[in-house]
Amino acid sequence: MRAHARISLDALRHNLQRVRELTAGTRIMAVIKANAYGHGMAQVARVLDNCDSYAVAHVSEAVALRAAGIGKDITVLQGAINREELLQASQSGVGLVVHASYQLDMLESNDLPAPVDVWLKIDTGMHRLGLAPGASGEAYQRLQQCAQVGKVRFMSHFACADDPGDPLNARQLRDFLAAVKGLGGECSIANSAALCAAQENHLDWVRPGIMLYGVNPFLPGRGEVQALRPVMTLSSGLMSIRQYRRGDTIGYGATWECPQDMPVGVVAIGYGDGYPRHARSGTPVLVNGIRVPLVGRVSMDMICVDLRQCPQARVGDDVVLWGDGLAVEEVAEYADTIAYELLCKLTARVEFSYR
Ligand SMILES: Cc1ncc(COP(=O)(O)O)c(C=O)c1O
């Protein structure tokens, strides 16, 4: 019995369409880094061919997309970190983010087979990657004068977009617009949460990631995006059912105790498949569509579930861990993490199908 991730191609197309409806007239850079948030990068790219461009994190991801036959514009969000990557990007016709002065120097001091398009990243408050707003004018001039550079555009990234009420969002947008004023290139600042939160964030390009996969991009209780559809449904099966006595403990560490005589099922999935080890007792799973709680610790290959609500369950029955009928956001809360991490972390043991 093997864990299975079913990827709904219709849901992917639908979610891209939702982005189009929300941002009419704005161009869309679909973020498909980290194996398309665990969904399969080349497969997702093919289905989202209606977007305007793709974004990945590393040059190697962009090269893999080209090898898979993807011809559309691709931007590497971390840019080239050495000369070899710069050459690969140029040879593959891939655009680069420039977020640090060493990347500018590299562009100026290397001959390339073809000019590369550049997104100049400005740090407006995330304080991770990007040039200071005051340095944008000079950097832009240098890029424009550089023979190795094609089109130049501007981007920044919000630190707190998942909390639309955070005052840092407005300050970052203001500082970004001030930094690029009068320079004339296209601009982008909005990820999923930011594009859903306010139209003023849309600018020329939006960069949705998580919402394409059907996940609400806001922190719990801070907002909801209507009509997204989950793309990944992770499922497995019941491999054992046994009756235990009141006071019996379940699993490693004997952390969960049966409050009464009861049936407990064992599901063929564990942290060896990418199911989060920190999912606590009470985390919901669906057995034949009925919500039941996980009990005890998550093991490498198995989890245990309380089957009191499901007395008719049988070995071999279907168990959904997240996706259709059970939001991955909810499971993430029980595991003290975010949906992004759960989706990205499935291991090679999980079988994927695309429909
Ligand atoms: C620079 C940048 N833009 C856009 C995105 C997409 O963000 P989200 O998945 O929250 O829409 C990311 C993701 O981390 C990113 O790093």
Image (cartoon, grey):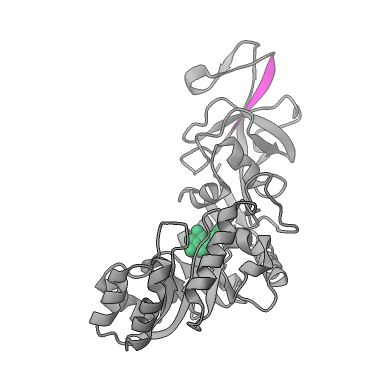
Q: Is residue 353 above or below residue 326?
A: below
Q: In this rendering, does residue 344 appear at all?
A: yes
Q: Is residue 177 above or below residue 172?
A: below
In terms of image quadrants, where is residue 146? bottom left
The residue that appears at 29% across and 79% down in the rendered structure is: 107
Query: Would residue 123 appear left or right of 51 to someone viewing this image?
Result: left
Q: Position of residue 90 (x, y in %)?
A: 34, 81
In the picture, the quarter occupied by the N terminus is top right
The magenta stretch is: 261-266
The residue that appears at 69% across and 44% down in the rendered structure is: 221
The residue nearer to you, when weighing 90 against 351, is 90
Q: Position of residue 265 (x, y in %)?
A: 63, 28
State whether the magenta stretch is mostly helix, strand or loop. Answer: strand
Q: Position of residue 190 (x, y in %)?
A: 58, 65
Query: Would residue 339 appear left or right of 124 to someone viewing this image?
Result: right
The residue that appears at 72% across and 35% down in the rendered structure is: 291
The residue nearer to you, when weighing 117 against 184, is 184
Q: In this rendering, does residue 68 appear at all?
A: no
Magenta segment: does it hold 213?
A: no
Magenta segment: does it hold 262?
A: yes
In the picture, the quarter occupied by the C terminus is bottom right
The residue nearer to you, when weighing 300 against 329, is 329
Q: Is residue 314 above or below residue 83?
A: above
